[in-house]
Each structure stands twice: as C-alpha cells, then as structure tokens.
C-alpha cells in the first residue's frame, strides 16, 4: 500500500479514536496531519484569547521541518499506538 493511501486510511481511523484519548495525543496527531498535508507553519501564532487554536498551532510548529513522508509515517505510527492503547 502506498504511503499516501495508508495515511488516508489512518486519518479515517483517527476519527474513531475512543473518547478517552488525551488532548495531548490529539494535538500530536494534529501537528503531524498539518505537516503532512500543508507543510511548515504558514500562519502567525494565534493570540492568548484563542487557547485551542494556539495549542494546535504549537503542535504543528513542534514538527516543523519534517518532510511530508516523515510526518505521514509519524501520524500512522501514532494512530496505531493510540488504537493499541484503546484495545
């Protein structure tokens, strides 16, 4: 299976993670997803009155510099890890 196909498959699986999934893990997934689909951060950091958007931006910034392929692979591995923890 091609990496992009596997990435899409795991992006769909990520939508069905258990409600007990920690926000920190969701932010990690968000950062990898944005890096894989958009690339490096291309917006300014949201202000302190938008804590959710700011946390998402920080998660994306944390993986800046990873290639699309590295971000996809990391995303897939994280989804697998979270599914395993839920089982």
Image: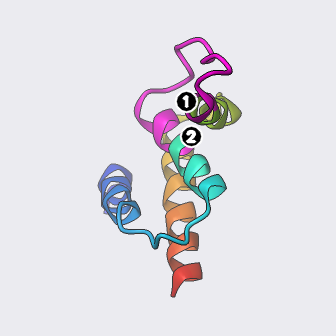
Image quarter of the N terminus: bottom left
Q: Is residue 37 above or below residue 9?
A: above
Quarter of the view holding residue 70: top right
Q: Nearer the viewer, residue 11 or 18?
A: 18
Which circle's residue, 1 or 2, is located before the other in the chain?
Answer: 2
51 horizontally vs 5: left or right: right
Residue 74 in the image: state x and y as whole percent.
Answer: 57, 53
Instruction: Give the labeled residue for mark 2.
Output: 31
Residue stretch in magenta: 31-54
Q: Is residue 82 left or right of residue 59?
A: left
3D distance between C-alphas at marks 1 and 2: 12 Å
Q: Position of residue 11 (x, y in %)?
A: 36, 55
Mark 1 — residue?
A: 53
Residue 16 spot, x, y in % from top left: 36, 68
The quadrant where residue 45 appears: top right
> Exactly how many numbered labels are in the figure?
2
Point 51% across, 44% down: residue? 30
How far from the left and from the top, in percent, is residue 52?
Answer: 57, 35
Q: Secondary structure at mark 2?
A: helix
Q: Which mark is residue 73?
A: none
Q: Is residue 61 above or below residue 47?
A: below
Q: Secondary structure at mark 1?
A: helix
Q: Determine the residue positioned at 64% across, 35% down.
A: 55
Q: Is residue 37 above or below residue 48?
A: below
Residue at (51%, 88%) from the top-left corner?
87
**Callout 1: 10 Å neighbours few (<14), some, many (20+)?**
some
């Amino acid at each position: 299976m091609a990496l992009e196909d596997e990435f899409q498959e795991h992006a769909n699986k990520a939508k069905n993670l258990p409600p007990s999934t920690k926000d920190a893990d969701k932010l990690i997934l968000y950062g990898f997803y944005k890096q894989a689909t958009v690339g490096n951060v291309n917006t300014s950091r949201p202000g302190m009155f938008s804590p959710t958007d700011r946390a998402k931006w920080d998660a994306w910034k944390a993986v800046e510099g990873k290639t699309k392929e590295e971000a996809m692979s990391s995303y897939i591995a994280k989804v697998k890890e979270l599914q395993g923890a839920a089982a």
